[in-house]
Image (cartoon, rainbow, N blue to C red):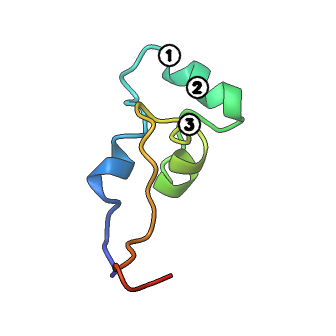
């Protein structure tokens, strides 16, 4: 499956730039507050996210 944008659950893990702590988040992981690459944002400040959900691949009942 291909998409031109990240799925909403992934986007929700990236803090808003309007968040007063956003510059601190960026500084703590060594990225610029001007970073636009969603994959960089997701893998750095979005790593923890607002939840503890874990995304795993789907397995049918017959797979190992």
Say which residue label 2 marks.
25
Mark 2 element type: helix
Tell whether label 1 touches label 2 (CB within 8 Å).
yes
Q: Could you classify mark 2 by the number of other residues whose Cα lies within 10 Å: few (under 14), some (14-19), or many (20 or more)?
A: some
User: Which badge, 3 or 1, is on the more N-terminal residue?
Assistant: 1
Q: Is residue 1 left or right of residue 13?
A: left
Residue 52 picture location, percent across and down: 45, 37
The tag on residue 45 is 3
Position above or below: 8 against 47? below
Q: Residue at x 51, y 48 (%)?
A: 42
From the viewer's perspective, is residue 56 above or below residue 26?
below
Q: Is residue 21 above or below residue 38?
A: above
Is residue 57 shown above or below 7?
A: below
Disc 1 element? loop
Q: Position of residue 64 (x, y in %)?
A: 51, 81
Q: Residues within 10 Å of mark 3 (few under 14, many from 20)?
A: many
Whether residues under marks 3 and 2 lie with C-beta atoms below 8 angstroms apart, the answer is yes
- The location of residue 34, given as percent across then percent down, is 53, 38
Rendered image quadrant of residue 18: top left
Residue 20 in picture, x, y percent from top left: 44, 14
In the image, what residue occupies the spot 31% across and 73% down? Answer: 3
Q: Nearer the viewer, mark 3 or mark 1?
A: 3
Disc 1: CA contacts within 10 A as few (<14), some (14-19) or many (>=20): few
What whole-number distance in Å separates the C-alpha atoms at marks 3 and 1?
A: 11 Å
- Distance (Cα) linking label 3 and label 2: 6 Å
Instruction: State the residue in front, 57 or 18.
Output: 57
The residue carrying mark 1 is 21
Nearer to me, 56 or 19: 56
Task: Return the residue found at the far left.
Answer: 8
N-terminal of the pair, mark 3 or mark 2, is 2
Q: Which labelled disc corresponds to residue 12?
A: none
| Residue at image coords 57%, 52% | 40
């Amino acid at each position: 499956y291909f998409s031109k944008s990240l799925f909403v659950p992934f986007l929700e893990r990236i803090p808003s730039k309007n968040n007063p702590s956003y510059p601190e988040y960026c500084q703590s992981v060594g990225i610029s507050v001007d970073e636009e690459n969603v994959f960089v944002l997701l893998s750095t400040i979005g790593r923890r996210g607002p939840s503890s959900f874990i995304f795993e691949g789907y397995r049918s009942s017959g797979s190992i």
